[in-house]
Image (cartoon, rainbow, N blue to C red):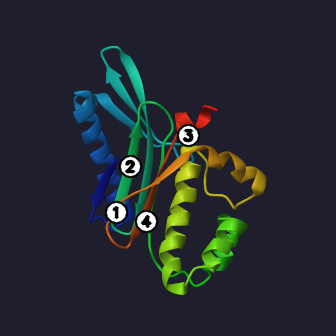
């Protein structure tokens, strides 16, 4: 995982996180930066191609920006998802939660004291976005059938600066699949 802080403007944040991804991949692969190509096709999952002596190697990427924080997750083994969300009070949180997080999560948020709701909403939103990115899906409204597959990935909360919530989505825990 890579994180950078300080870029409020979205295009500057995109350039900065992409430069950080290339630098990290160069360090990890011992390749010069010129042999690393980032691909971020619109509406598709971003990835990197490493031009190694043994041929091209694909690295799965997930990227997220909010406020002045940008995060990226890298995986050579398969899909990965990541999301960061600025914690803030959202006046119409209930309607947004009902549309995008589903009835169970909306009920759980409604049961919280108002003072705890913004943080919990940001965590729930980040988890949803990270799961969607893991599966290469764009943000869509919640539906029972559409969301069922999202439960397959494992989500880990991220330790981030105060005022942010973030989640990393990974493949299911192999131990949980053995029964």
Question: Considering only order in the chain, which callout, 3 or 4, is on the residue closer to the N terminus?
Answer: 4
- Give the camera-side residue of 167 and 33: 167
Proximity of marks 4 and 1: CB atoms separated by less than 8 Å? yes
Q: Residue at x 39, y 68 (%)?
A: 164
**What distance separates the C-alpha of mark 2 from that of mark 3?**
20 Å
- Give the camera-side residue of 95 and 176: 176
Nearer mark to the viewer, of 3 and 1? 3
Q: Which mark is residue 160?
A: 1
| Disc 4, SS | strand
Q: Where is residue 126 drawn, in percent x and y?
A: 51, 61
Proximity of marks 4 and 3: CB atoms separated by less than 8 Å? no
Nearer mark to the viewer, of 2 and 1? 1
Disc 3 designates what residue?
172
Q: Where is residue 132 drawn, in percent x and y?
A: 59, 51
Q: Which mark is residue 35?
A: none
Residue 39 in the figure: left or right of residue 44? left
| Disc 2, SS | strand
Nearer mark to the viewer, of 4 and 2? 4
Disc 4 designates what residue?
165
Residue 76 in the figure: left or right of residue 105? left
Q: Quadrant of residue 7?
A: bottom left
Q: Residue at x 31, y 67 (%)?
A: 161
In the picture as drawn, the residue positioned furthest to the front comes out as 179
**What distance separates the C-alpha of mark 4 from that of mark 3?**
21 Å
**What distance separates the C-alpha of mark 2 from that of mark 1?**
13 Å
Question: Considering only order in the chain, which callout, 2 or 4, is on the residue closer to the N terminus?
Answer: 2
Disc 2 designates what residue?
72
């Amino acid at each position: 995982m890579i994180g950078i802080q300080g870029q409020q403007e979205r295009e500057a944040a995109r350039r900065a996180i992409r430069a950080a991804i290339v630098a990290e991949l160069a360090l990890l692969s011992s390749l010069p930066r010129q042999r690393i190509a980032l691909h971020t096709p619109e509406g598709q999952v971003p990835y990197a191609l490493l031009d190694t002596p043994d041929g091209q190697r694909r690295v799965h990427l997930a990227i997220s920006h909010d406020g002045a924080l940008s995060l990226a997750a890298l995986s050579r083994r398969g899909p990965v998802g990541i999301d960061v969300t600025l914690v803030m009070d959202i006046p119409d949180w209930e309607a947004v939660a009902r549309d995008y997080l589903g009835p169970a999560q909306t009920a759980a948020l409604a049961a919280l004291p108002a003072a705890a709701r913004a943080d919990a909403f940001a965590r729930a939103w980040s988890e949803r976005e990270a799961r969607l990115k893991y599966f290469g899906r764009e943000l869509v409204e919640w539906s029972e059938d559409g969301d069922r597959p999202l439960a397959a990935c494992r989500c880990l909360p991220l330790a981030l600066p105060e005022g942010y919530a973030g989640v990393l989505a990974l493949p299911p825990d192999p131990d949980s699949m053995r029964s």
